[in-house]
Amino acid sequence: MAATALARRGAGIAAALVRRGRGMCSASATAPAAALSSEELIRMERDCSAHKYVAFLRASLVSSLLPPYHPIPMVFSQGEGAHIVDPEGNKYIDFLSAYSAVNQGHCHPKVLRALIEQAQRLTLSSRAFYNDKFPIFAEYLTSMFGYEMMLPMNTGAEGVETAIKLARKWGYEKKKIPKNEALLVSCCGCFHGRTLGVISMSCDNDATRGFGPLVPGHLKVDFGDIDGLRKIFREHGDQICGFLFEPIQGEAGVVIPPDGYLKAVRDLCSKHNVLMIADEIQTGIARTGKMLACDWEGVRPDMVILGKALGAGVVPVSAVLADKEVMLCIRPGEHGSTFGGNPLASAVAVASLKIVRDEGLVESPEELAEASKALSDVLEHDLPQMQKQVKKSKSEAEKPVCDRCGRDLYV
């Protein structure tokens, strides 16, 4: 009863806030979400949020492969496992998995149990104090991935920014790069977030236009171009502190590098004393059939950035993994986060990682790939009008395989 009363009070406050506004949000904003159709919810979001101009004005540019935050005109209202449901009751298979944030499946009961139990005990201690959940998370994560230390953050972009700071600090303290001359190399087409420091590494004009001046100290190379990377290292190696990359590019269209690329990167980084920094936020935690995508070539980066599935789609959790030689370059007071390592996120993260281990998620992608191919073949044969893109292998082009949505199950 108390929860119901609180929910009603919250709805009343929200309605009052809408009424106090300039009238841009429709009156239907005060209605319960369950009573609104997909069309009404999309219209409400366009009217009341920053998505209005991105999604509405660029609607004509929408294709089957969308950049982040140009939403497909589809509303999710419920999720369980691999399935999601819209307000009209249509059921879908979710192959996107929220950009890999729900590799364990939507609303996994073990994750929800950990969330609820911890939320009833303690949600935040801040880093001014210890809590009884973060040490367990830290030990579990470092043991699972084989690194000496971890640094907890919240979002993926925070994790990337943390790795950049670590690389620069290591460059000055360990590699003895002259003050303020450290360089970081990154790949065109890789996506690492939308903070100012991160977009400063981008080759995408849409990501940087209107946000200058950008952060200096970055060099760029084409993804998969080992000769180009070798040339940059040869010319600037003494100043380069790190090479940041995605093992498989996500936003660029699931771009897999040539065979042997990751091994060659490892060799170059070792030769030139450059930190190999793998952004495994999207590819890590069992997304590719290995715990990390770098495992496919048996390479061990100097730093690994994790996020997304670390929180199983329930809370934002990210972390940077490295050994002490790198991690201890950061001293108390030089970096941190109020919410980083909070007990709620720590409990959820441990539950999320245990699901990956206990339910064999590292082994399952190969089986799922066969099932997905069979489904694609059926859809291609039976629903020729549906339009969707499936990347069948790294050597084959994207192939449109399905259509218009069926009545009971959508893909």
Image: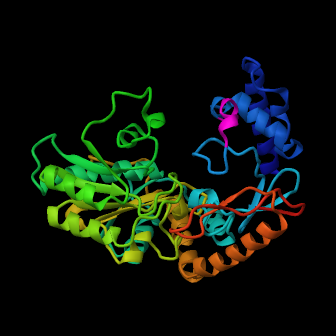
In the image, residue 19 sits, relative to residue 6, either above or below, namely: above
Q: Could you tell whether 114 is left or right of 56 in the image? A: left
| Image-based side of 277 in relation to 6, left or right | left
- Whole-percent x, y for residue 30 in the image: 82, 33
Q: In this rendering, does residue 337 appear at all?
A: yes
Q: Is residue 72 magenta?
A: no
- Comparing 249 with 327, the one in front is 249
Residue 149 position, x and y percent, is: 31, 67
Q: From the viewer's side, name the closer residue of 333 and 326.
A: 326
Residue that extends furthest to the top in the rendered view of this protein:
22
Residue at (35, 78) in percent of width and height? 298
Q: Please state which of residues 112 and 262 is positioned toward the viewer in this rendering.
A: 262
Q: Nearer the viewer, residue 287 or 349?
A: 287
Vertical placement of residue 33 versus 393, above or below: above
Residue 170 visible at all: no
Query: Toward which corner of the image does residue 244 lie, by quadrant?
Result: bottom left
Which residues lie in the magenta part?
A: 55-62
Q: Main secondary structure of the magenta part?
A: helix
Which quarter of the rendered picture does the C terminus lie within?
Answer: bottom right
Tell me the residue at 89%/43% (across/down).
35
Q: Is 56 part of what is drawn in magenta? A: yes
| Quadrant of the image occupied by residue 145 | bottom left
Identify the residue at horizontal 88%, vertical 51% (top origin): 88
